Image (spheres, helix red, strand yellow):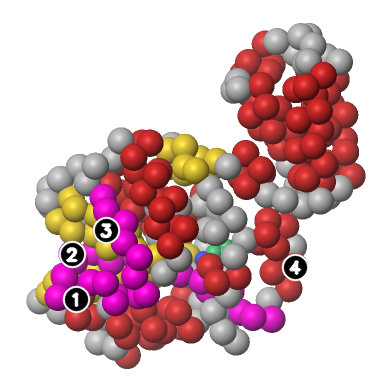
Amino acid sequence: MHIDRLLGRAAERLSEAGSASPRLDAEVLLGHVLGVDRTWLYTWGDRAASGFERARFEALVAARAEGHPVAYLIGQREFWGLALATSPHTLIPRPDTETLVEIALELATATEGRLLDLGTGTGAIALAFASERPGWQVTGIDRIEEAVALAATNAERLNIANVRFLVSDWFSALANECFDLIVANPPYIAESDPHLMLGDVRFEPLSALVAGEDGLDDLRRLVKSAFPYLRPGGWLAMEHGHDQAERVRQLLQAAGYLDVASHHDLSGQQRVTLGRMAG
Ligand code: GLN
């Protein structure tokens, strides 16, 4: 069967199954099976796929139709232009989180410094930042060993050397260390949020998504416990839900952070809030 026709049929099936991007999903999955990019598929749409390729593609389409995220099916997701390996042990990097990277880069005006990424998962934020600031030493920590191993693999594959990844429950492995910048995309969804029943999040680790009754458990803990690990004048910047900005600003102000402010993401929502340590 020709590639065009295979894609058309798969897109139809995925659309019926409720995917929000059926054609794109089909192209990414077929590109993965054939080892080619999407441009290749447009150019060579009249080529035939082999029986083996077709069987592999159809198995992936069936899994996608059941709701499995494309990033887990192909084991990869692009973030900040970097191809990151993904696994069901970690959250799938989201384009929204690139806003946090942009803010971290704006704050990192010195050529040298130290950044800590808490709950690094695939290593997305740490790696994006490290790739843009080669003079900085970047540390990514995660409580989950598989996440730390995955992030380290990503660093190696991308040849990013100014980063290290450690297993650490919050700051436990970082005694006496100080950072110019601490960033985090912690879990921030409320336990009862119906959003958890929809789309990719159903397949992602709950530990990376859910933070208590109001979704603020981890943000609260972060604001409280980061203080001793920040240099005087250092910044803490956190991603949060679109309706949490005011509460996160209050948490930072109550804990004594200065210059507390929230920033908009691409869709105009306040999704990142930051504060500075006196000094
Ligand atoms: N932004 C993600 C979502 O809503 C959640 C990420 C997180 O909890 N850190 O799907």
Q: Read off the residue under disc 2.
A: 180
Q: CA distance from mark 4 to mark 1?
A: 39 Å
Q: Read off the residue under disc 1.
A: 175
Q: Is 127 placed left or right of 67 in the picture?
A: left
- Whichever of labels 4 and 1 marks the residue nearer the N terminus, that label is 1
Label 4: state its secondary structure.
Answer: helix
Q: Nearer the viewer, mark 1 or mark 3?
A: 1
Residue 205 at what x, y percent from top left? 59, 65
- What kind of residue is marked 2? Asp
- What kind of residue is marked 3? Thr
Q: Read off the residue under disc 3.
A: 139
Looking at the rendering, the stretch of residues picked out in magenta corresponds to: 163-192
Q: Read off the residue under disc 4.
A: 197
Rendered view: 254 above or below 65: below
Q: Residue furthest bottom?
A: 254
Q: Is 158 placed left or right of 178 in the picture?
A: right
Q: CA distance from mark 2 to mark 1?
A: 16 Å
Using the image, tell me which numbered label, if any, was put on residue 245.
Answer: none
Q: Is residue 137 visible?
A: yes
Rendered view: 204 above or below 77: below
Q: Residue at x 89, y 44 (%)?
A: 16
